Image (cartoon, rainbow, N blue to C red):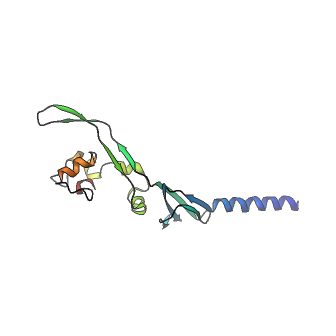
């Protein structure tokens, strides 16, 4: 009887010990939450500690990600249709801002802003499809100022 209780106690302590550790690799960002609120988001790669059942950890890619859209038919100035295939290379720079903006869902980050989905165009020099276009094309539409994303892409 005493030996069984000791084995159960050792098993419970082992489970709590393992669930209180988490690792962050070089290719990941990690955010630690305490009861749903962000506690910390600046983890270096390695082994870290959390409180089991109180803290949880979400991890996100640190590497460059690719958004590849389906080809779209566009009409040229000569009134001919061409198939335009576009892609965007992007990465998360501020993981805490990314999480609060998208609830940690990469699919939300891949969608165009709400005003473009609803057909509104807040800036006259921006095309509604510019949010899905190649970033280089959007930069060329804005006089080559590519130090930050053009305001129509934000």
Q: Residue at horizontal 61%, vertical 62%? A: 53
- Relative to 126, 86 lies left or right: right
Residue 10 quadrant: bottom right
Q: Residue at horizontal 81%, vertical 59%? A: 7
Q: Residue furthest top?
A: 80
Q: Residue furthest right?
A: 1
Q: Quadrant of the N terminus?
A: bottom right
Residue 98 quadrant: bottom left
Q: Identify whether 28 is placed above or below 128.
A: below
Q: Measuring from the top left, give residue 31's x and y in whole percent.
A: 49, 62
Q: Residue furthest bottom?
A: 39
Q: Nearer the viewer, residue 42 or 146?
A: 146
Q: Measuring from the top left, give residue 51's x and y in whole percent.
A: 61, 66
Q: Identify whether 2 is placed above or below 74.
A: below
Q: Measuring from the top left, give residue 118's x and y in whole percent.
A: 26, 48
Q: Residue at horizontal 47%, vertical 66%? A: 42
Q: Residue at horizontal 27%, vertical 45%? A: 134
């Amino acid at each position: 009887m005493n030996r069984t209780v000791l084995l159960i106690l050792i098993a419970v302590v082992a489970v709590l010990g393992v669930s209180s550790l988490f690792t962050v690799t070089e290719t990941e960002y990690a955010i630690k939450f305490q009861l749903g609120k962000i506690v910390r988001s600046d983890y270096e790669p390695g082994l870290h500690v959390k409180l089991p059942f109180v803290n949880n950890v979400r991890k996100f890619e640190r590497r460059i990600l690719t958004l590849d859209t389906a080809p779209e038919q566009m009409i040229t100035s000569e009134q001919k249709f061409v198939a335009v295939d576009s892609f965007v290379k992007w990465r998360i720079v501020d993981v805490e801002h990314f999480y609060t903006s998208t609830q940690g869902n990469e699919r939300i980050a891949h969608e165009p802003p709400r005003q473009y989905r609803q057909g509104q165009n807040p800036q006259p020099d921006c095309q509604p499809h510019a949010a899905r276009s190649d970033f280089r094309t959007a930069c060329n539409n804005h006089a080559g100022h590519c130090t930050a994303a053009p305001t129509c892409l934000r």
